[in-house]
Image (tube, helix red, strand yellow):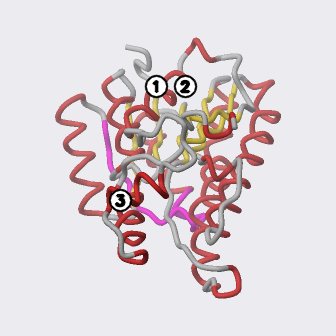
Amino acid sequence: MKLKDRAAIVTGGGSGIGLAIAELFAKEGAKVALNDIDVGRGASEASRIDDSYGSCIFVEGDISKPENCKNLVEAAVKEFGSADILVNNAGLQYVSPIDEFPEDKWELLLGVMLTGAFYCTKYAFPHMKRNKFGRVVNISSIHGMIGVKFKSAYVAAKHGLVGLTKVTALEGAEHGVTANAVCPTFVRTPLVENQIDAQAEAHGIPRDEVIEKIILAEAPMKRMLEPVEVAELCLYLTGEAAKNITGATIPIDEGWTAQ
């Protein structure tokens, strides 16, 4: 087991990429604190993982709020004795031109995906430094490396997350703490599935055509990623073999940025 007895925190773990990460980590021996704002879904998935692999708890909370991030870290430390691994994964999307972008949506997206990642890192960092071991994995996006129209808040948050990753890596280096940003292209998650449906309705075209002509237009390999593929990279980055990989921005983009 690659993560035996490690304590991991995964935000946005109730579905999609976060759920795949939480489940794979538990399978590999980690004790997992699964966070989600959706109590029903998050608690159900945490219970299922605990029944299958053991040592998975659910911690409710909107991580755009500092007190919830602090409570999440404290719950993991109280239950497992440490906070060795932090995966900042929670995310959401809103699509609108800049001049029409609702201000509350801007605050929400930045709050969850960037500010929340900062708060979780802030509160987990002392435990990692004290134990001389820590792994921070920030789930950014291909849009943390490039821009795209009508997603100003998402692109800004994901670019910011890459910057936060670099600072975390520099500050953590002398303490045995690494930090890396994973940047997937489109992954088959509820978030992306909802985007496909919205695009199909907006353009008046079938879902398959949206996937082919919009979602995968810039991806040379012409396929969507599965959540477990992202989870497997996160598993590697949190293990012993990746102890010297830090401050990296790692795309899983099927050749998108090679063009």
Reading the image, the residue beneath label 3 is: 193
Measured in 3D between alpha carbons, the distance from the residue under mark 1 to the one under mark 2, in whole angstroms, is 10 Å
78 relative position to 159: left or right:
left
28 relative position to 125: left or right:
left
32 relative position to 102: left or right:
left
Q: Would you identify the image quadrant in which residue 228 lies?
A: top left
Measured in 3D between alpha carbons, the distance from the residue under mark 3 to the one under mark 2, in whole angstroms, is 28 Å
Residue placed at 17% from the left, 35% from the top?
51
The spot of residue 173 in percent (x, y) is 78, 26
The spot of residue 43 in percent (x, y) is 26, 54
Q: Amino acid at mark 2?
A: Thr
Mark with earlier residue (3, 1): 1
Q: Would you identify the image quadrant in which residue 99 lies?
A: bottom right
* 63 falls in the magenta region: yes
Magenta residues, as a range? 56-69
Measured in 3D between alpha carbons, the distance from the residue under mark 3 to the one under mark 1, in whole angstroms, is 33 Å
Mark with earlier residue (1, 2): 1
How would you rate the neighbour count of disc 3 (Cα within 10 Å): few for under 14, some for 14-19, many for 20 or more?
some
Residue placed at 60% from the left, 43% from the top?
138
Quadrant that contains the C terminus: top right
Residue placed at 65% from the left, 17% from the top?
243
Reading the image, the residue beneath label 1 is: 6
Give the number of the disc on residue 238. Answer: 2
